[in-house]
Amino acid sequence: MAKESKNKTRVQRWRNKFRFIILNDDTFEEIITLKLSPLNIFVVSVIAIISTIALTTILIAFTSLKELIPGHASSKLRREAIELALTSDSLQAALESNERYIIGIKRILEGEVIDTVLMEIEDKYTDSTISLTLSNPSTQDSAFREWVEQENAFTLNESGANLGIPQLISPLEGIITSGFDKVGEHYAIDIAAAANTPIKTCHEGTVIFADWTSETGNIIIIQHENNLISAYKHNSALLKEAGEFVRSGEAIAIIGNSGENSTGPHLHFELWYEGAPIDPLGFIQF
């Protein structure tokens, strides 16, 4: 009973009302009179605290005041960061495209076949949205190429002119490792060069054979004017097919080491005139 009485006394204390009066100090006139209890003060205080927290949260969440909080970036800074990230990605893609273009141009200048270089780059970068393209040659480029071709064209000696053989150019720049030997039945010269070096036709003509054999690997044979035939053996790849017409100096194959009779990467080059083998060194300056 004493415990219950004590609890009732505590509750009563929370409910006891007190008068809060503000008086004029000179006239003792009552200006404000409030009746308060501890329970009312507690409830009002809780409501004020909750309201303050809610209002502060709303102001921070939906106004620019949140930008004043340390560590919280502004919306403008976030937009700028996103724009910078997109610009960086675009610049990276453009840089990679330029690097691929430069690598392709370098390989082409070193003598590789243009179509082969483009195919390899496209296969390696199939996900790239920017492909490697080559513009049409300028007037200066065409004039320079014509000058180079003319420099390489005048390689025919007097014996070739007497036989009616057209002016021929070297199919490959390299080291001659084996010469023409009619007694040893080696009716050709062997020219060694770096891997992936393109092989060019010595004169314009029509491809009459382009296939693979077990002994000499990939072979391409071209019929020229005046009953002249040139053969290119042991290639790693053929760039032309039978029936195609090729111009003088046009790439027709890639140097290789194919076939059972090959002992290393080289070109086995043969010339046949009116059905008989002739020494290429007598008609071409290598």
Image (cartoon, rainbow, N blue to C red):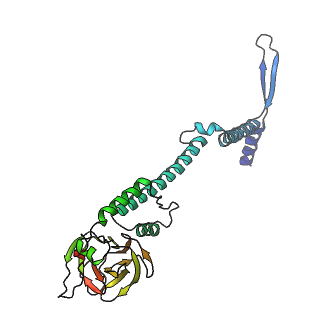
Above or below 158: residue 241: below
Q: Nearer the viewer, residue 10 or 198?
A: 198
Q: Where on the picture, by quarter, is residue 53? A: top right
The percent position of residue 245, horizontal first and vertical second, equals: 44, 76
The percent position of residue 209, horizontal first and vertical second, equals: 39, 84
Above or below 91: residue 63: above
Q: Nearer the viewer, residue 208 or 216?
A: 208
Q: Where on the picture, by quarter, is residue 258? A: bottom left
Q: How many marks?
A: 0
Q: Residue at x 61, y 43 (%)?
A: 75
Above or below 171: residue 43: above
Q: In which quadrant of the rendered image does the C terminus lie?
A: bottom left
Q: Residue at x 34, y 88 (%)?
A: 213
Q: Nearer the viewer, residue 45 or 176?
A: 176
The percent position of residue 208, horizontal first and vertical second, equals: 40, 83
Q: Where on the picture, by quarter, is residue 17? A: top right
Q: Is residue 86 left or right of residue 170?
A: right
Q: Is residue 132 left or right of residue 255?
A: right
**Residue extending furthest toward the left:** 183
The percent position of residue 68, horizontal first and vertical second, equals: 58, 36
Q: Nearer the viewer, residue 85 or 250?
A: 250
